[in-house]
Image: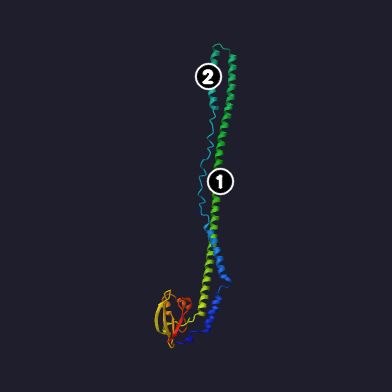
Amino acid sequence: MSKNYKRSPLKLISGAITALGAYDWGGKRKKEIAESQDEYDSMKRKFMGLDTSNLYGDVSNPYANMENTMEDLTVNQQQAQFEAQQGQQQRANIMSQMGGAAGSSGVAGLAQAMANQGQLQTQRSSASIGQQEAANQKAAATQAGALQKMERQGAWKSDMTKRAGAEQSRALEKQKVNTLFTMSANRLGTAKTAHQQAQQQMWEGIGSAVSPMDDVSDERLKENIVKIKYSDSGIPIYQFNYKGDATVWRGTMAQDLIKLGKERAVTKYEDGYYRVNYGLIDVNMEKVNRL
C-alpha cells in the first residue's frame, strides 16, 4: 500500500474548513451558554420559591362564640302583680261590704270601692303595656340573632371566595413559572449541546487536517504487526508496515477501536477499508524507520 494513497491535500483542506467553521468566533456560543445559565438559575429560584402553604390552614368555625341574644331577656312581672293585687282588692271589697252591713257608712264604702276599681284599671293597662314590651324585646333579640348569623355566613362565604381565588391564582403562577423554567432548561441544554457538537466538529477537523495518518488504519492492509504497548486509555499500540511499503510505523488498528467502543474515531470509506482519526484518540501515528 502506497503512502501517497493515505495523504490527500483535499482531505487536509476539508479538515481545516471544518475546524474553522466550527470554531466559536467571538465567543457567541459561550455567551449563549452563560445567558442561558443565568436565565435557568433565575427561573429555578422562582420555581423553588413558589408558595405552597395551605391556604385553608387557619380556617375556623364561623359560628363559634356567637353571642346569645336571648340571655338578657327578663320576665315581665306586671301581669302577675296585677292579678295578685286584683285578688287582694276583691277580698278587701268583700270585707268592706261586710263591714257596711254591720253599720259602716255605705257612701264611704262605695267611694272606697270605686277608688279601688280605678286603681285596678290603671294596673290592667300597665300590665298590657308590659306584655307588649316583653314581646318587642323578644322579637328584637330574635332578629339580632338572625342578623348575627347572616353576618357570619356572609363573612364565611367571602373568605372562602377569596381563598379559592388565591388558590387559582397560585396554580396559574405555578404553571407559568414551571413552563418558563422548562423553557430555560431546554434553552440551556440546546446551547450546551450546540457548543459540544461544535467543539467536537472543530477538533475532528483539526485532527483531520494535522494528523499525519488519519486514513487507512485497517489491519487488513498491514503486515509484520507486533503489539508493543497500550495507551493511557487502554488502546493497543502496534508496530507494522503497510503491504507493499517497507516503512515501519507505530499506531493502532481500526478494528481494535471498534471493539473498545471508540467508533467515533473510525470511518469506513467506500473502498471498504477503515480509517482512523488520530486527533480523537490518545495514540499518535509515528514513523519508526525503514525495514
Find residue 1 and report its horizontal and vertical position in percent. Answer: 45, 87
Q: Which residue is mark 1?
A: 155
Q: Residues within 10 Å of mark 2 (few under 14, many from 20)?
A: few
Q: Quadrant of residue 78?
A: top right
Find residue 239 and report its horizontal and vertical position in percent. Answer: 42, 82
Number of numbered discs visible in the structure rendering:
2
> Which is more N-terminal, label 2 or label 1?
2
Q: Which residue is mark 2?
A: 91
Give the amino acid at mark 1: Ala
Find residue 118 and report its horizontal and vertical position in percent. Answer: 60, 22
Q: Residue furthest bottom?
A: 244
Looking at the rendered structure, the secondary structure element under dot 1 is helix
Q: Is residue 77 left or right of residue 226?
A: right
The CA distance from mark 1 to mark 2 is 61 Å
Q: Residue at x 41, y 80 (%)?
A: 238
Q: Residues within 10 Å of mark 1 (few under 14, many from 20)?
A: few
Looking at the rendered structure, the secondary structure element under dot 2 is helix
Q: Residue at x 56, y 43 (%)?
A: 151
Asked whether 17 or 58 is in front, the reply is 17
Asked whether 176 or 18 is in front, the reply is 18
Observer able to see residue 272: no
Tell me the quarter of the image containing the C terminus.
bottom left
Q: Residue at x 55, y 41 (%)?
A: 148
Observer able to see residue 112: yes
Q: Residue at x 59, y 22 (%)?
A: 119
Q: Quadrant of residue 230?
A: bottom left
